[in-house]
Image: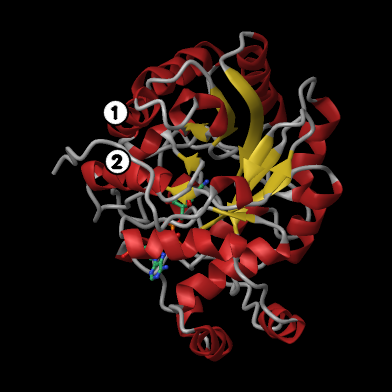
Amino acid sequence: MENKTPFSIAADGVNPAEVPVKVVASGAKMPVVGLGTFGSDSVSGEAIATAVKEAIAVGYRHIDCAAVYGNEHLIGKSLQEVLASGLVKREELWITSKLWNDKHAEEDVIPACQKSLRDLQLDYLDLYLIHWPFPNHHDPGVDVDARDPHAIPYIHENYMKTWRQLEKLVDMGLVKHIGTSNMTEPKLELLLRDARIKPVANEMELHPHFQQPDLFQYCLDHDLVPIGYSPIGSPARPPRDTTPDDTVDIEDPVIVTIAERLGVHPAVVCVQWAVQRGQVPIPFSTKRRNFLSNLQTAVSDPLTADEMTAIAGIDKQCRLIKGQVFLWEGAESWEALWDVDGTIATK
Ligand SMILES: NC(=O)c1ccc[n+]([C@@H]2O[C@H](COP(=O)([O-])OP(=O)(O)OC[C@H]3O[C@@H](n4cnc5c(N)ncnc54)[C@H](OP(=O)(O)O)[C@@H]3O)[C@@H](O)[C@H]2O)c1
């Protein structure tokens, strides 16, 4: 279903000039709430592209994309329509995309970014991330037990070869900033040591039941914006991404009680907590009412200090996106992807 309504600024939206920003090392400004665009298996690319246009109409200026989401060509049409209207200028938008795991080889990186740019109908990206630190990939929608027979553990030398190509993208003017996703402290430590052009952000799973306090603080201490994915706890993720032990943030009594006080959906409390804590949440929604409420958190009265303390106390260390499909032969558990003992797993 394609939305044929011409682009216009919504009267009931949030003034983008009032949305706080994170200023990165270059001085560029990243709005503190972005729109996620990963529809899992259940939301069509067309619906997401329509949401992108409507989200910009209600004040979003930050959109989180990725080649692997399979919808950049549709989002590109929305962006083109928005920019052609003259109501929003390219420099007012912060557009992120990500290099998929099957494009880590040196010769594949620049063409992959150029493809995202063509699909998104843009001359440059504000941020380009390496989606996962491994070149391990799989067919879309495979079972969690599926394994790529060529999958390997993290090899820093290889990651740096990919990173050098991202640095070239900056030199070429195709990308303003580069960053990481799904990294750990020991991996970031090596990258920060060796990068000619430093990452400005790390995209990581962050929600009240998975607060990653150490990695979050590490990012702040190293001028990396912590971009928080699945900020609502991804309640509609497909069954293959759920395990029986997963907890549900939006059903947590602490979150529900605050939502009742504010008269909002518990999802909105998760987003507000994220903004107030200092990360940049990128909630996904294709429902206007929902994505508008999520953006309004950036300009709303803050949660009380007691509420922030209460939410800090409900961390269940419940990682939802475990990444099992990226495991290599011989790896014992998905925890090998996350360097849980502080060292990089080599087998
Ligand atoms: N870098 C990575 O590896 C990585 C991994 C995962 C995700 N991401 C990015 O992070 C984005 C967000 O994560 P996510 O999609 O996993 O999950 P999420 O944002 O935590 O949750 C999205 C779900 O919350 C619902 N929701 C959103 N706002 C709501 C509101 N105000 N009230 C009620 N329900 C609401 C949405 O339903 P409705 O549509 O019905 O509103 C949707 O089902 C992705 O889209 C993607 O861009 C990145």
Q: Amino acid at mark 2?
A: Ala
Q: Which residue is mark 1?
A: 77
The vertical placement of 93 against 175, above or below, is below
Specify which label sits upstream in the sequence, 1 or 2: 2
- Answer whether residue 337 is visible to the viewer in this image: no
Q: Residue 190, position in %: x, y? A: 80, 35
Left or right: 20 with respect to 265? Answer: right
Which element carries disc 2, helix, strand or loop? helix
Q: Which residue is mark 2?
A: 49
Q: Residue 15, position in %: x, y? A: 53, 50
Answer yes or no: do the residues labelled 1 and 2 have beta carbons within 8 Å? yes
Left or right: 158 with respect to 80? Answer: right
x 20%, y 40%: residue: 5
Q: Quadrant of the C terminus?
A: top right
Q: Quadrant of the N terminus?
A: top left
The residue carrying pointer 1 sits among few (fewer than 14), some (14 to 19) or many (20 or more) residues within 10 Å by Cα, namely some
The residue carrying pointer 2 sits among few (fewer than 14), some (14 to 19) or many (20 or more) residues within 10 Å by Cα, namely many
Between 198 and 346, the residue placed more toward the observer is 198
